[in-house]
Amino acid sequence: MKQSVPERKHRVSTKPKQPRHSIGSEFSHFFKGLWRLRYRIYAIIVLIALVPVLYAGSLNIPQEAKLAFGFTTLHSNAIFSTVERSNSSPFTFGDNVVAISEKFNYFQNGENIQDENIEYLFGQLNLSANEQIRLSKAAPLDQLISCPKNPQLVNTLRYPQYNITTPVIYSELTDLFQSNDDGSINYQAPIEEDLDQGPLSNPIQRLLVDGIVHIAFTAQPGEIGNSYIVGHSSNFSSVQSDYNFIFKPIERVSQPGEEFFVWDKCGRELKFSVFETKSILEDDVQEAYKIFPDKRVVTLQTSILEWVPGIGFYPTKRWLTRGELVLD
């Protein structure tokens, strides 16, 4: 008797058949992938090509721009530049040298990084209206106000509201500081009064006999900075002078909004509008000689006497009247 053979059932696979890949098809897919990524590849190539340029620093601000605006190039390349404009203080006091600096960073296409008022475009300095006004105000005084051919007054201060008219005497550094053996100025050794010889042993006190005194290491009246001028509100009874009390009328009285006038060495009439009055301690030289890097300031100073036990009346404070040059 024959045995029956069970029928074989054919299973149908549900998995998709994997296509056979040839070498040509693999290359085709590879290049298609590259094509889809072509823009990223372009960007990478451009960045690699720019690396030497970014660090080359071969471009500079035009010489005329550096001369006109006082810029020093710190870094410059085809993409962006960094420049610095430095304005040293008008004096060196002891070991302290104060410097004011401004840094500007900007793209070469003119888009500014930090400062809205300055741009660098195609190798030329393009300034906004506000920056042009600011830089024009920073120009030397001779470019803003010319000296008169026939001056009526020179070296004179007038404060009409208090009926003050007085000569301005310009001190020298040798009136303020002692000299070294080689003749150089010793900024760490200010000249002091010799009590045995009296108040006029001090050169500044001698100058104050003839008017008010401009301090030598500060800016000239009308120039950028703090032009410091001192005058008496009182003086020693032994000193005979018409100017012993010249600034007494403004001591603890002057107010912002008032005006005073200075006729400088060449006879220019300079008008100053008072913007600040204050009392400070006598030894607060940092506030007294405060730096104004973007203003043309004249500070009028007079001493405030107060009773000190064991000493008597003594100048313990300074009264400051600060005015800014008015440019029409």
Image (cartoon, rainbow, N blue to C red):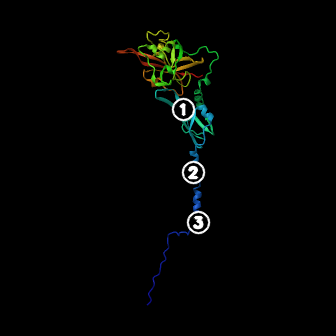
Measure the alpha-carbon separation of dots 3 and 1: 66 Å
Using the image, determine if residue 202 lies above or below residue 69: above
Q: Is residue 317 left or right of residue 292?
A: left
Mark 1 is on which residue type? Ser
Find disc 3 in the rendering and name its residue.
25
Mark 3 is on which residue type? Ser
Find disc 1 in the rendering and name its residue.
86
Measure the alpha-carbon separation of dots 1 and 2: 35 Å
Instruction: Give x and y (percent) for residue 131.
Output: 58, 31
Measure the alpha-carbon separation of dots 2 and 3: 32 Å
Instruction: Give x and y (percent) for residue 244.
Output: 47, 11
Q: What's the mark number on residue 30?
A: none
Find disc 2 in the rendering and name its residue.
48
- Quadrant in which the C terminus is drawn: top right
Q: Is residue 105 left or right of residue 280?
A: right
Q: Which SS class for mark 2?
A: helix
